Image (cartoon, rainbow, N blue to C red):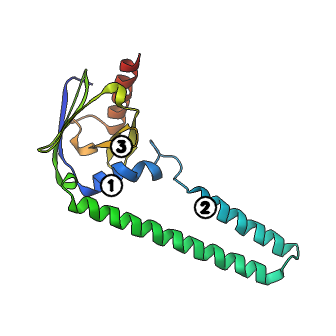
Amino acid sequence: MTEPMELSYKMTPETQFNAAFGWMVRRPEGGVGYFQPWHFVILAVGVASVVLAQLGFGGQSVLAGAVLGFAIMLLIDLWAGLSSNARIRRLYANSYVGHADVTVTLDADGVRFRDDRTDAHYDWRAVDDVIALKSASGLRMGASTLPIPNDALPTGTTPKEFRQALRDKIAEKRH
């Protein structure tokens, strides 16, 4: 990575949303998705009900009840997730941060994030990881993620190369 590297881009509500929540459903460089622990409880109860019905405990009514209950819980979960996501997306769409013109400077001292209302500096040691997001890379710092869209990267730099260069810089500064 050539230093300093200055990247400018327009923050969008979608980029902001993906930075805030994308890490939960998209693991870096692929991988499995995110599940709530209670999804496994529902699945276990459903499987146990089917097994009990097959063993003759309760018969078809237990099986029908288990399948109906399982379907209802999945619908409730789907509705809750979609309505929550819609509310959060509206917040980003209506907020200043979802539409800011951003400049990020990466240099030997760390990361500087600027827009017309913010000027923040993060030491490299504050960056926990660099993760792949949908159409962006994210600098994860605790529970916060600073997104850098892939189209803001220098010409000829792939997102994977960019993330690796940042990971190398973080490792170098931590030693």
Residue 170 placed where, x, y %?
A: 37, 25
* Residue visible at 75% across and 78% down in the picture: 63
Left or right, 38 with respect to 79, comes to right
Tell me the residue at 24%/38% (across/down): 153
Sequence-earlier tag: 3 or 1? 1
Tell me if mark 2 has few (under 14), some (14-19) or many (20+) residues whose alpha carbon lies within 10 angstroms of its own: few
Residue 25 drawn above or below residue 131? below
Q: Which mark is residue 89?
A: none
Of the 4 image quadrants, the one containing the C terminus is top left
- Determine whether label 2 and label 3 are within 8 Å by CB: no
Q: Which residue is mark 2?
A: 39
Disc 2 residue type (three-letter): His
Residue 13 visible in the shown view: yes
State the residue at coordinates (77%, 72%).
50
Identify whether 172 is placed above or below 100. above
Mark 3, Cα crowd under 10 Å, few <14 / some 14-19 / many 20+, is few
Marks 2 and 1, how far apart at CA:
23 Å
Asked which quadrant contains residue 81, the reply is bottom left
Q: Which residue is mark 1?
A: 17
Residue 168 image offset from top left, x and y in percent? 38, 24
Label 1, secondary structure: give it: helix
* Residue at mark 2 to residue at mark 3: CA–CA distance: 26 Å
Horizontally, residue 71 falls left or right of residue 134, namely right
Side (left or right) of 24 relative to 20 = right
Q: CA distance from mark 3 to mark 1?
A: 11 Å
Which residue reaches farthest right? 56
Q: Which mark is residue 144?
A: 3
Which quarter of the figure is the N terminus placed in? top left
Q: Earlier in the sequence, mark 2 or mark 1?
A: 1
Q: Secondary structure at mark 3?
A: strand
Say which element carries label 2: helix
